[in-house]
């Protein structure tokens, strides 16, 4: 029996989709696999359980045939259609097509004309100039492919936080069921909620390490055991992620957790502080340094609080900010702010509906908002000028507003819906619609949806112009990056943030897990500039609204507090943060 979690299933379906695209299958066919994969990634219940109960077709986008393939995958580790395609095309072709700026058509050309089937071969063909033998590519295209390859290689061995976190949580849950396990906690980059994860680190606490090591080898998620010793076992999971599980004794638990949470930079600085106090910290505890440097009396290590407090810290630095970027000085002095928490979130500021390119209705979004305990939500469909997704015309906006009004009247306990829109920032920095239409929204987001090939200066100018618009309240996904797939625009971020402060424009923290845009370091700059942050999941399905946790994690990494965050405000305050509240009517 193979343990495929939802992420692992989604990855196989994406592979299927990519192979179909390379094979030249029709668009509808390969997109259906990709859409199903997206749905399954965000699905709250494990598909393996649903398959046992014959309920897979309850998932939107999963028909009888696909349900059959998923069952085959769960039982045999693959499915026949996928195997047939794998036999036809070398797996390396999929690697090629996933390189930004390559895509399926070019990957196929590189294969057909130059016999390229690996990233290494692609790199060689670029460096030798041989790549130019494939017609129709100018120097600029080739330079773009070279950059794309660099981006891709940088992310090859890493996974998005969204793919690692649910897996780690299931493993922790599984381990906690074991009698010998007193506690199990994720550490490493995962505990720091870094946007991508190299491997999962888990610290377990037990008096019986061999029993725990065996439990790890037998975990349902374990596909292959890489190494297993007395205190550490490393396994590989079906989704290709490595998991390192360590066992420590209860009195070492805090020291081990502190050590393996990192970051390395943070730990190096913590050790310097220990030295100044005549102490030494390692993964076993905190010790006073004795005569001639000998390890002396143990002064702590059972809990993380103890480790930091015996070293003179007034506060425990939250894992998300452990980067030696000022958190140590602040925690020593007791000056750390209380960072934003998921429970502070009262609503979501970026949501699409079936009126444009999303799959859930306004009512479904509202039901999810209610389930998440929100006080309000928004509708921010795409604006008119984005024709490819049937952006909202004024006529359709009027229909949508009527629907919003109807839902808001007699809403009882249900969350309140704010009327918003995601405007498109044009080449000259102007946005969709006439000012009277813009004035009719409760608020507007404005995003760049074109000009990805432009230089940073041009994009910066467009943003500066858009922020001057009295109806533009929030800049959506400001850098435009897609982690591992599209590089961020080279914005002059300082200039953007200065202008945002000047004009009272907020910056979005897009919480969609492959965007996380603005990113942590830019959020911290925004805070320094006094620019407020609006978190939006950019949900294209109601289930995506659960991605808020990745937004909050990223906000915390950027030192954002409830006072800096639009989503943490009651509705009245929310309205007062929109520019139009200051316009004289
Ligand atoms: P990753 O896995 O690449 O996403 O990043 P991390 O931070 O999880 O790195 P990893 O898995 O190599 O190690 C986990 C933590 O253990 C790391 O954040 C700090 C600690 N650590 C590991 N190796 C060393 C080391 O050689 N020196 C120090 N000071 N700490 C280490
Ligand atoms: Ca790690
Ligand atoms: Ca590790
Ligand atoms: Zn959007």
Image: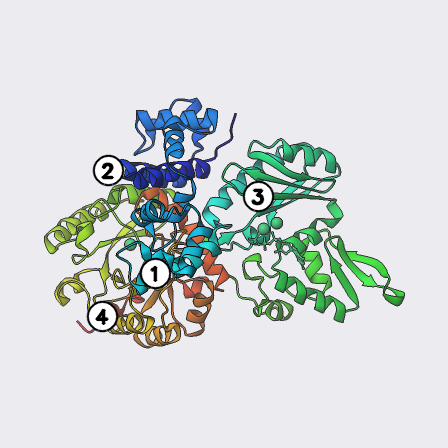
Choose the circle earlier in sequence order: 4 or 3: 3
Residue drawn at (59%, 67%), measured in percent from left and top?
A: 324
Choose the circle earlier in sequence order: 1 or 2: 2
Q: Nearer the viewer, residue 128 or 522?
A: 128
Tag 1 residue: 142
Q: Quadrant of residue 22?
A: top left
Residue 457: % across, % down: 31, 74
Confirm or deny contact between disc 3 and disc 1 (CB under 8 A): no
Q: Is mark 3 within 8 Å of ligand 3?
A: yes
Tell me the mark number nearer the camera, choosing from 3 and 1.
1
Q: Alpha carbon of mark 3 to alpha carbon of mark 1: how far?
A: 34 Å
Q: Nearer the viewer, residue 351 or 450?
A: 450
Tag 4 residue: 429
Tag 3 residue: 242
Say whether residue 36 is left or right of residue 426: right
Picture disc at residue 26? 2
């Amino acid at each position: 029996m193979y343990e495929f979690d939802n992420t692992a299933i989604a990855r196989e379906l994406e592979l299927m989709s990519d192979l179909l695209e390379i094979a030249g299958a029709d668009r509808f066919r390969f997109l259906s696999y990709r859409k199903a994969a997206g749905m399954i990634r965000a699905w709250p219940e494990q598909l393996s359980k649903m398959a046992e109960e014959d309920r897979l077709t309850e998932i939107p986008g999963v028909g009888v045939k696909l349900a059959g393939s998923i069952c085959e995958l769960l039982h045999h580790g693959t499915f026949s259609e996928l195997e047939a395609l794998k036999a036809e095309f070398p797996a390396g072709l999929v690697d090629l097509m996933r390189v930004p700026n390559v895509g399926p058509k070019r990957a196929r050309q590189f294969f057909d004309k130059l016999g390229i089937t690996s990233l290494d071969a692609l790199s060689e063909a670029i460096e030798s100039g041989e790549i130019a033998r494939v017609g129709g590519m100018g120097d600029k295209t080739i330079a773009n492919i070279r950059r794309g390859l660099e981006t891709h290689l940088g992310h090859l061995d890493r996974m998005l936080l969204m793919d690692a976190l649910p897996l780690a949580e299931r493993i922790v849950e599984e381990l906690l069921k074991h009698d010998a396990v007193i506690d199990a906690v994720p550490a490493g980059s995962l505990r720091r909620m870094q946007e991508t994860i190299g491997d999962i680190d888990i610290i377990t606490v037990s008096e019986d390490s061999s029993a725990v090591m065996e439990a790890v080898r037998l975990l349902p998620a374990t596909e292959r055991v890489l190494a297993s010793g007395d205190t550490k076992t490393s396994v590989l999971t079906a989704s290709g992620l490595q998991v390192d599980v360590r066992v420590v004794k209860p009195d070492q638990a805090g020291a081990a957790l502190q050590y393996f949470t990192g970051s390395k930079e943070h730990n190096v600085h913590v050790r310097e502080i220990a030295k100044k106090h005549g102490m030494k910290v390692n993964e076993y505890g905190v010790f006073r340094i004795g005569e001639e440097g000998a390890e002396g009396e143990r002064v702590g290590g059972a809990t993380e609080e103890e480790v930091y407090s015996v070293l003179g810290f007034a506060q425990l630095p939250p894992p998300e900010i452990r980067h030696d970027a000022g958190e140590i000085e602040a925690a020593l002095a007791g000056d750390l702010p209380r960072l934003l928490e998921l429970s502070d979130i009262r609503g979501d500021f970026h949501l699409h509906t079936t009126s444009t390119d999303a799959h859930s209705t306004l009512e479904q979004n509202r039901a999810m908002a209610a389930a998440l305990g929100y006080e309000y939500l928004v509708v921010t469909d795409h604006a008119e000028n984005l024709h490819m997704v049937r952006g909202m015309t004024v006529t359709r906006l009027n229909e949508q507003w009527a629907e919003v009004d109807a839902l808001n009247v007699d809403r009882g306990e249900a969350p309140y819906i704010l009327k918003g829109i995601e405007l498109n920032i044009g080449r000259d920095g102007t946005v969709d619609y006439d000012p009277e239409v813009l004035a009719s929204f409760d608020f507007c987001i404005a995003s760049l949806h074109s000009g990805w090939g432009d230089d940073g200066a041009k994009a910066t100018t467009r943003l500066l112009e858009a922020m001057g618009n009295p109806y533009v309240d929030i800049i959506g996904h400001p850098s435009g990056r897609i982690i591992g797939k599209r590089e961020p625009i080279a914005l002059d971020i300082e200039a953007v943030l200065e202008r945002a402060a000047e004009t009272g424009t907020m910056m979005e923290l897009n919480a969609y897990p492959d965007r996380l845009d603005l990113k942590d370091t830019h959020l911290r700059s925004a805070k320094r500039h006094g620019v407020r942050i609006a978190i939006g999941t950019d949900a294209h399905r109601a289930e995506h609204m659960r991605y808020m946790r990745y937004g909050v994690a990223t906000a915390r990494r950027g030192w954002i507090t409830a006072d800096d965050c639009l989503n943490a405000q009651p509705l009245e305050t929310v309205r007062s943060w929109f520019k139009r509240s200051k316009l004289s009517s």
